[in-house]
Amino acid sequence: MNTCRSCGAPILWRETHAGRRMPIDPEPVADGNVVIEGDIAEVLKAEHLARLGGDVPRYRSHFATCPQAAEHRRR
């Protein structure tokens, strides 16, 4: 596990299907939209989330929770 260089919060780094690295908050949350399968993170749309079973952990991108996320956004 790593820490965010802006806010110091713990984060997990996972690759997406597109090969990009995404910082993820390590604790599952009920309203998360990220599912991790192996080492791959997949961001799901609402219609796909509704079909997930209750036993599938859902996470949130750290970009959604970091107080300094704007510093890391591409222009």
Image (cartoon, grey):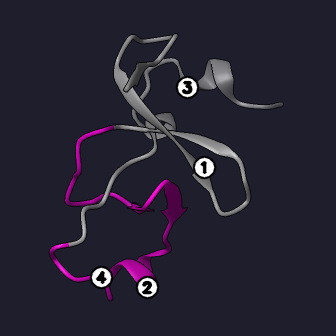
Could you tell me how far apart the alpha carbons at marks 3 and 1 are, in whole angstroms? 18 Å
The residue that label 4 is drawn on is 52
Residue type highlighted by circle 3: Ala
Could you tell me how far apart the alpha carbons at marks 1 and 2 are, in whole angstroms? 22 Å
Could you tell me how far apart the alpha carbons at marks 2 and 4 are, in whole angstroms? 9 Å
Could you tell me how far apart the alpha carbons at marks 3 and 4 are, in whole angstroms? 28 Å
Q: Considering depth in this image, is 5 or 30 the residue closer to the camera?
A: 5
The residue that label 1 is drawn on is 15
Residue type highlighted by circle 1: Glu
Residue at 42% x, 12% y: name it. 7
Residue at 33% x, 57% y: name it. 32
| 3 and 4 marks in contact (CB < 8 Å) | no
Residue at 46% x, 18% y: name it. 4
Q: Nearer the viewer, mark 4 or mark 1?
A: 1
Q: Considering depth in this image, is 18 or 60 the residue closer to the camera?
A: 18
Query: Of label 3 and label 4, which has the lower sequence position?
Result: 4
Quarter of the picture holding the N terminus: top left
Left or right relative to 63: residue 10: left
Could you tell me how far apart the alpha carbons at marks 2 and 3 are, in whole angstroms? 26 Å
Query: Of label 2 and label 3, which has the lower sequence position?
Result: 2
The residue that label 3 is drawn on is 69
| 2 and 3 marks in contact (CB < 8 Å) | no
